Structures are given as structure tokens and as C-alpha cells.
Image (tube, helix red, strand yellow):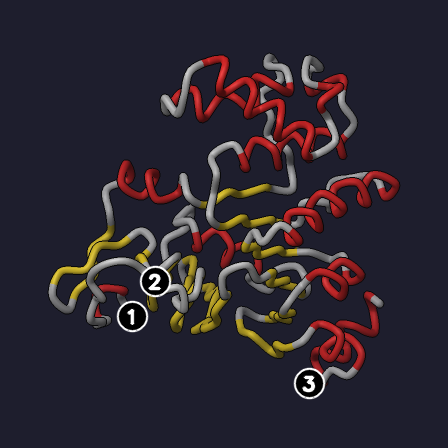
Amino acid sequence: MNPNTHTQSAAPGAVPPSTPMVKAEAVSKSYGSNMVLKSISLEVQRGEVLCLVGPSGSGKSTFLRCINHLETVNAGRLSVDGQLVGYRQKGDKLYEMHPKEAAKQRRDIGMVFQRFNLFPHMTALENVMLAPTLLGKGGKAQLKARAMELLARVGLADRHDYYPAHLSGGQQQRVAIARALAMEPKLMLFDEPTSALDPELVGEVLDVMQGLAESGMTMIVVTHEMGFAREVADELVFMDGGVVVEAGDPVQVLTNPQRERTKAFLSKVL
């Protein structure tokens, strides 16, 4: 099935406040004969935190990458803030955007990966300043002040002149979060942001993420940290085999799962 077979009437003008920040409609993705996502439909409202949990290979990270068009979908449609992601609609057909157009859309979506991907030859401050500087988002003094504010927000103002090699894994991940925030995104995606960290460093990253959630940032988080999901998420989605098996209030899903597959998974991780 091809994305250009779907229809939708576009609403002109400003995006109504009731429009979901993220809307997935029957999203499917395959690599050859391997179907990784099978007709995923879900919504995330503005200011909400959605946590995606499930076993490795269940499609969580692939879904996250489809949201900012790092991966193309084979069927269905994804919208962020009322705008189709990666496609342009003409009549009743969808056409994939030019990579430069898709990259512009991506600026509104911050993403933090398992690996920190910081530039090793740049200080923490320089890493945070880089993208806004390249895009001409302000003068040097203004961008430096903003980057220092963001480093302070993640508790690293005193490490602004450190290179990544001289920062712990948790500190590097916090710099990566500050770097994503420097683009002033409307949505933040986190792909297992603590899975590469030593256990004692996990808390400092989760604390920053909790602060972001409390500030009203819309977030989708792929995580194995069930305590974080319970405390911070507005909705918990359990995926397995490329489908949403169960979704709902995090406390309800974690303490009283309705599906046998969810029960089996949680019995091993809780």
C-alpha cells in the first residue's frame, strides 16, 4: 500500500488549539518483507508525554523515526501540529517532499538518541550553539547567552567549556538535550535516552526530562524506565510485533494490564 493512495481535506488557516501535536493514522512501515509497523494509529495532545514501551524489535524506535521523517512510511499518514510530515498533498494524493523541505520541518522536532552524537572537537557550549548559528537564528552573543541558559537548565552551566571526552555519559546526554532544545522545538522525541548510561547516571537525565514535561513540552519517549513512565507519562503505549497491544493511563497499564502479552512483558521488567 502506498501513501499516495490516501485522501484528506486540508483545513486552511491557523492550526486550532484542539489539533493533536502528533497524529498517526494507520502508519505502516516495512523493510522488504519485514513489516516493522502494522497500521499504527495514535494521538498525542499538546503538552502531553507519551511513553512507548515494549520488547526490542517491536517497532518503537522505527515509529519515532517516522515522526520526523528520518524513515519514510509505506502506508498511512503522520501529522505534527496539523501538518503532514514528509509529504505534500495535491488533490487526493500525497507526494514525498524534497529532502530540504523535510529537513526544514525537522527543525521543529527535537530528537535525542541513545548515543549522544556530540561533536568531539567542540565544547558543550559550542555543540549547543552550532545548529542555531548555522541557521542564523541570532547574533553570536545572543546565541551564546541562550546556549548558556539551556546548559544551566540541564545543570551543566559549570561544564560549558568541557569537551565531550571530559564529560560523563549522563552529562553528554544532558548536553544533547540542551542541543535539541536550542532549536526551540514544539515536540521532543527521546529514543531510549538512558539505555547507554551507567545505572547511577540514569537519574540525572530523567530529572531533566521530568523538568521538561513539567514545563509543558510535548514529548514522546521510548524507554525501559517504567518508574519514569509511571510518574511522568500521560499515556503509556505497549507495542509488540509492530502493533499497539495496549494503551492507557500508565498506572492502570502497569498495575492492571488487560492483555496477556502486556502481562507477560511486564512480569519480566517490573
Residue 74 numbered mark, or none: 2
Q: Residues within 10 Å of mark 2 (few under 14, many from 20)?
A: some
168 over 97 or under it: above or below: above
| Amino acid type, mark 3 | Arg
Residue 10 screen position, x and y as percent: 21, 66
Residue 208 screen position, x and y as percent: 71, 43
Q: Residues within 10 Å of mark 1 (few under 14, many from 20)?
A: few
Left or right of 270 on screen, residue 196? left
| Amino acid type, mark 1 | Met
What element does badge 1 sit on? loop
Residue 170 screen position, x and y as percent: 76, 34
Q: Sequence order check: which comes first, mark 3 or mark 2?
A: 2
Q: Disc 3 vs disc 2: which is toward the camera?
A: 3
Q: Residue furthest left?
A: 91
Q: CA distance from mark 3 to mark 2?
A: 28 Å
Q: Residues within 10 Å of mark 3 (few under 14, many from 20)?
A: few
Which residue corresponds to mark 3?
259
Which residue corresponds to mark 1?
1
Q: Sequence order check: which comes first, mark 1 or mark 3?
A: 1
Residue beneath the point at 42% across and 46% down = 70
Residue beneath the point at 72% across and 62% down = 229
Quarter of the image where one finds residue 33: bottom left
Residue beneath the point at 58% across and 54% down = 216
Residue beneath the point at 31% across and 58% down = 84
